[in-house]
Amino acid sequence: MKIRLFGIAVLMLALLVGAAAVVLGPRRLFVGGRQKLERGWNIVTGRLVNVDGHYLRLDRTGKGTPTVVFDAGLAQGRNTWGQVPDGVASFARVITYDRAGLGESDPGPVPRTSEQLVHELHTLLAKAGETGPFVLVGHSLGGLNARLYALRYPDDVAGLVLIDAAHENEYERIAAMLPAPERDKYLQHEGGDNYEQVNLLASAAEIRAAGTLKPMPLVVLSAGRNEWAGNDPARLQLRAELQSSLVRLVPGAGQVIAEQSGHFIQLDQPTMVVSAIRSVVQAAAEKRTSLSLAPVAPSHDDLSLFRPTLPMNTQPLFGEGSH
């Protein structure tokens, strides 16, 4: 009797698979099944981690401490880093990941601000068994996130690398330069009407209210080609001021001007980015809170670009406190 029931179950399963193949087509059925198998495998192997009910995708490679964690720009997945993670993996443990709704990660809860993104990253690392200390590398929006993470979890963060990072004061100041129709569209986008649904205006307010970073190794990499500003002298000056302001977040920080790069420095000059990360990793490993005056193993285009922090008494920007 049991054998007969088993045979009936097998036959029914075969009929269901056959019917699905007819309705969906063999290729679609195969692709869907493969995707489910891949997702299951990624969960089993720790590449997909349950964070408050949704799964986030991460990759881990390399060895050494501190661990380097990469946080990408707005609407950018873990593939935005190009060759840089492989270069860093030669001297440190590396973690890249897709934020919720990007790449292979599930959509996350709304509203989405840096506070929520930082919470999800912290939970992801904890669930994945990663205890730090961490050097956080943030590009664009990822720079805001990295700073907020360091403020929320100061004992977990040993250093920061900010790559053409967003600044909390840029949104209101850019908006003030735009004509009314363009300004409204810009503020709508930055307020959450973007692919990732991140409210950058609220994120900026969160950073402003979060306090002051503890002393730690910090490098700011700034694009030498500011395409977004065009030829507008006021916007070019604003960009330079905001990037210099990031260098003043902690004493002993440094700035690299990536003369040959646009916003995606990690793609235009990856060797420079790897060198900057190496400098911070080494300083953190040696328990130093300031940097050497030159990056380790610079490439031919890095030699004259690294400089120490601006004076700490430089006039702060509007809306900032002195650090």
Image: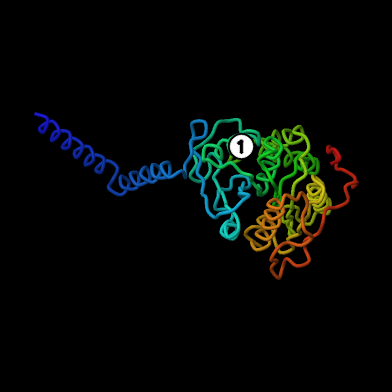
Q: Which percent across, then down, holds residue 199?
A: 66, 35
Front in this rendered view, residue 107 or 5: 5
Task: Please give the residue where the numbered disc 1 appears in the rendered image.
Answer: 117
Outermost top residue: 1
- Mark 1, Cα crowd under 10 Å, few <14 / some 14-19 / many 20+, is many
> Is 193 left, or right, of 53 in this rendering?
right
Q: Which percent across, then down, holds residue 209?
A: 76, 32
Q: How is the image coloured?
A: rainbow
Q: Where is residue 300, by image quadrant?
A: bottom right
Q: Residue flagged by tag 1: what amino acid is it?
A: Leu
**Above or below for 301 versus 15:** below
Q: Which percent across, then down, holds residue 268?
A: 65, 62
Which residue is depicted at the point 54% across and 45% down?
Answer: 98
> Is 299 left, or right, of 60 in this rendering?
right
> Is 273 left, or right, of 323 in this rendering?
left
Outermost bottom residue: 300
- Callout 1: helix, strand or loop? helix
Q: Which percent across, then down, holds residue 275?
A: 68, 61
